[in-house]
Image (spheres, helix red, strand yellow):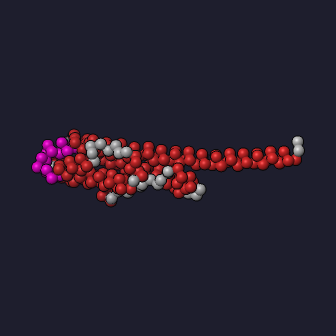
Amino acid sequence: MSKGIKTGLIVLAAILFLGASIYRFFTGNYNRMVELDEAVTSQWAQVQNQYQRRLDLIPNLVATVKGYASHESEVFTQIAEARSKAGGVVNIDESVLNDPEKFAEFQKVQNNLGASLQRLLVVSENYPALKADQNFLALQDQLEGTENRIAVERKRFNDAAKEYNTFIRRFPQAMIASSSGFTPKQYFSASDQAQSAPQVQF
């Protein structure tokens, strides 16, 4: 085998090795971005599940309180309006994760609903018979548990979003992310009032 052929084969091998390395680098990073993006989407679904659970508890809780405090119409109206704005169903398209305005609107609706529930629970303190009602106590426990789950799922969502956002902003992944359409996810940042579970001590 001549020296020229050997040199040609070495150059060809080096080009193939370099090409394979570049391919592995790009595909590996791209696949990791897909994996992290899916983790954020999955965690978003868990946040929605807990908000839906809270939304589903509201009619029973309101009906129980109405039995004892039917003249508290202003509070019931506020809850009805807040629940209506939430749409009755929390299942929001995941595209909201890439739209800061939609994400902020989603948070605002949930914060308003949480504030309305807090007002309902404050009203219930004026009715000793209601505070002793077993159905109300069970609903109160479920609501408290749901608020805690919401807080946990929001934190997990933010953790997943942080891992994803950090990965796509690092160099050289940032070049792959920008050319492949991977954009940063929004973080859940609730108001101070919404971050607290409703006060349910009676």
Percent coordinates x, y for residue 93 in the rendering = 37, 45
Q: Is residue 104 above or below residue 84?
A: below
State the extent of the magenta-drawn residues as a range. 61-75
Say whether residue 1 is left or right of residue 129. right
Q: Residue at x 39, y 43 (%)?
A: 45
Say whether residue 138 is left or right of residue 71. right
Residue nearest the viewer, comparing 120 with 102:
102
Residue extending farthest bottom: 192
Percent coordinates x, y for residue 1 in the rendering = 88, 42
Percent coordinates x, y for residue 31 in the rendering = 56, 45
Percent coordinates x, y for residue 149 in the rendering = 36, 46
Q: Please state the total of marks drawn on the protein image.
A: 0
Looking at the image, can residue 140 be seen? no
Residue extending farthest left: 71
Looking at the image, can residue 57 be seen? yes
Q: Residue at x 36, y 53 (%)?
A: 103
Judge whether residue 64 is colored magenta. yes
Q: Residue at x 76, y 46 (%)?
A: 12
Residue nearest the viewer, comparing 19 with 62:
19
Q: Residue at x 58, y 58 (%)?
A: 171
Residue nearest the viewer, comparing 193 with 29:
29
Judged by its main secondary structure, the magenta piece is: helix
Q: Is residue 61 above or below residue 115?
A: above
